[in-house]
Each structure stands twice: as structure tokens, then as C-alpha cells.
Image (cartoon, helix red, strand yellow):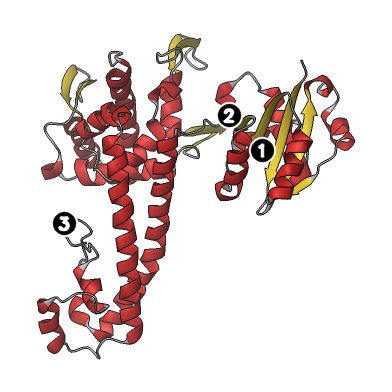
Amino acid sequence: MTKIFIGLDVCKASVVACKLHSDNLKTEPRQLFYELEFPEFKANPEGLSGLLNFIGDGDIVVGLEPTGMNYARVWIEQLGKRYEVKMINHKDLKSHRKMLRFEDKNDDTDAFCLAHYCSFYDNHKYRFVGFRDGIIAVLKAMINRLEHLNRVQSPIVNRLRQDLAWQFPEVALKRVRRSESKKENADLSPPLWGWIAGEKIVPRYDRLYQETIGAGLTESSRLDAARLCDLEREMAAIEKEMAYLYRTDPRFKPYSKVLDSFAFPKKTQPIILSVAFPIENFLKDGKPEVVERKGRRSGKKTKKHLSLRRFQKAMGESPSEKASGDKEERSIIHGSSLCRKAFWQWIFIKIEPVKNRPQGSRLIRTTDLDGNPVIKPICQHLGEIYDFKKSNGVPIGLIRSNLASIACRHLFRALVSEVCGIQEG
């Protein structure tokens, strides 16, 4: 039976489609490209109907890029009800376009390359971006929303603090925190912003304002404070809903147990979960994939921990090598930037300050600084590495990057052990 591959290049309010049949894939790609049509369909009922008629029936695979997900989501949801939809990484598609020797980049060539990529790697699942579980997709959307609100909030805070420096300097540099209350529907916006906006009564600020040497609050400052209160309330509501989803789904309990044992902050855990779940996605036949290969430099047989590498790559903790002649570069260009940020924040808060290192963190099998096998808490182990390298003048940024990579390896083994029942190695 002929298999059909559809490439969809998603635009802001439309898609450009390409249709390839498995029978005509033997034709040289550039010649085939000029024989095809590339219709455009608008994001409306008529456009969707036209696209479905263009695709037709049969054994069909639809491929598109996960970039611009806000524009692609409507097409994924509509087509996912009827066909198999596969997501193709932008960098992989770029490499495939080069392989096909398509120098021009436009909507038609993108659609063709997407369809051709689907046909070329049809039986290789790791060549495609996996779809997230429904709740994971919701968590990821909430995480992205929080990141957006943080970016929106920062310039408003900076502007307000600059204005307070001459309007009410006594509180201009004051550290701002949310209110703490266990009451249902309590206003958790920071007291200072609420007082400036006229939404909260705070006697200590009233007293300070009566004696201020500043020129007095302006209407623009009160409006900025009101905006910050609205943002904080929205962020608090999202975090509350995230915590509820994270803690109530029974599938997340072993992940939560492991992340708690690593002393990851509660707000950080959903970020890591959104990439790590399900851990089985990184395994092969339910077990970590390990192969033996001859080392390119040593010539000896070495073990390649492929599942671990995939996990580190997804977490943004695996550097990519770029070498040519005597020149060699290593940089992290793949994976989740939010997970990478979460690991660095965890190191900054829980590992670097000696007093903050939890003694009750997860026990791991490792070696001490002299190479002797030991079992000790992960946070204590990383703290000792941090102290040793810092005392030897290693740059702080390099230490943090190294600690994050070590922690990521131990996290993978811990998740495999807890979720799959496979002993950590």
C-alpha cells in the first residue's frame, strides 16, 4: 500500500502543504520538487476543509516543525484527530535541507523538506520530537507563561525602583516578597506594591512616607505598582495550579520522591518533570541503552551510555563537540534552557552555601577526591567538589557547569531506579 507523507510549513495564519507518495521517492529530490504543487490553506474552516481534501485518505504521516507552536497548535489538534502527526526538530530539518542541496529557504522548500524528512526517517522514532503527555503539556504551558510574566515584570520593577529613588527613597531598594497566607483566595501580591497602588493598608509604610525626604509618589508609580500586583496575583494562581497538578497525579509520585531527595525547590521540580517524564522515553525496551564501541582515540572498547546521553541532551547538560584539525570547541546548544537554568539555581542555592547543603539528600555511589569508592549524600558530594575546585582557582562558571552535569547523571540513574526498578549504576 502506498504511504503518503505530508509536509506542512506553518505560517502565522496559514500553512503551505506538500504531498509525497512513497512510490515517487526514487525520483531525484530537486526534479521531484519542481513537479509538485504547494497549495496554501488559511487558518479558517474553508482552509481546513481544503487541506483535508488535499491530504485525502490512506496511510498518512504529517510532518511539521515545533517552532512557532502557538501558530502550529491548531493544525496539530485538528490533524492529530485524523492522521499520524510527527514533529521535526528545526536543526535536524536544516541539516536535511543541506543534504538535499536546497540552497533557497522559503515556504515551498520547507514543506518539501518536511515531507521528505518524514519519508527518509519514517522508521526511526528518535529522529522526531516526541509529543508530550496531556498534563505535561499543560504544565509546560504554565511554565512558559510564568517565564513570560517574569520577563514582563522585570522592566516594570526596574522603572518603579528608579522612580522610588527620588519619590520615596526609603523603600526604593527594599526586598519585595509576596504575602504569606493559607487562606483561600487570599491576595498574595507583595505588601509594598499593594500599598503604593493603594490596594493594601500597611501602617509601617504610612509612617515612613510621612517622614520621607522624597518628592512623593506620582500617579505613574501607583499605576506601575498596580500592574505588578496584577502580575504577581496571576503568577501565584499559576504556581498554585501547577503544584496541584504536580502533587495529585499518581504517575508523578516517584519523580517527586526523587526530586525531593535531591532537594530541588518545589517551584523548580515541575520544570524538570516536564522534560524527564516519562523516563521510559529515554530507554530502550525498558532498560538504559548501553553499547560497546571502540574509542576513536584510545582504540579500546568503551561503553556508550546512549540513554544517559539522550537524557543529558534533553536537560541541556550535554555539550556538543565541534573539532577541526587542531581546533576543538565544546558548547551546549541543545536541550531545555529552563532545565539548565533550574540546575544552576539549585547549585547556587543548595550546593554553594555550606550551611544550605542538606545532609539528608539522596545517597549515591561515587568516589571521593582520592578515587576511593564511597556512599554519601549527593548534595554533600557536590559541595565537596565545589569547595575543592574553588580552592584551586577554577572559574565559578566552569564549576557550576561541571556540577550540573554530574547532578544530571545521578538524577537519571535515580529516576531509572525509582520508576523502573532498575538498580542505579
Q: Secondary structure at mark 2?
A: loop
Q: Quadrant of residue 82?
A: top right
- Residue underneath mark 1: 94
Q: Residues within 10 Å of mark 3 (few under 14, many from 20)?
A: few
Nearest to the observer: residue 84 or residue 110: 84
Q: Is residue 384 above or below residue 304?
A: below
Nearest to the observer: residue 199 or residue 364: 199
**Left or right of 42: which side holds 126?**
left
Q: Does residue 87 show up?
A: no
Sequence-wise, which precedes: disc 1 or disc 3? Answer: 1
Q: Marks 1 and 3, Cα distance to the nearest angstrom?
A: 52 Å
Residue 72 picture location, percent across and down = 60, 45
Q: Quadrant of residue 185?
A: bottom left
Residue 223 picture location, percent across and down = 35, 79
Residue 358 picture location, percent across and down = 14, 37
Type of amino acid at the residue the image marks with label 3: Lys
Q: Secondary structure at mark 1?
A: helix
Residue drawn at x 33%, y 17% as measured from the top left: 420
Q: Marks 2 and 1, Cα distance to the nearest angstrom?
A: 14 Å
Type of amino acid at the residue the image marks with label 1: Lys
- Residue underneath mark 3: 183
**Rendered-image quadrant of the C terminus:** top left
- Residue underneath mark 2: 128
Q: Quadrant of residue 362?
A: top left
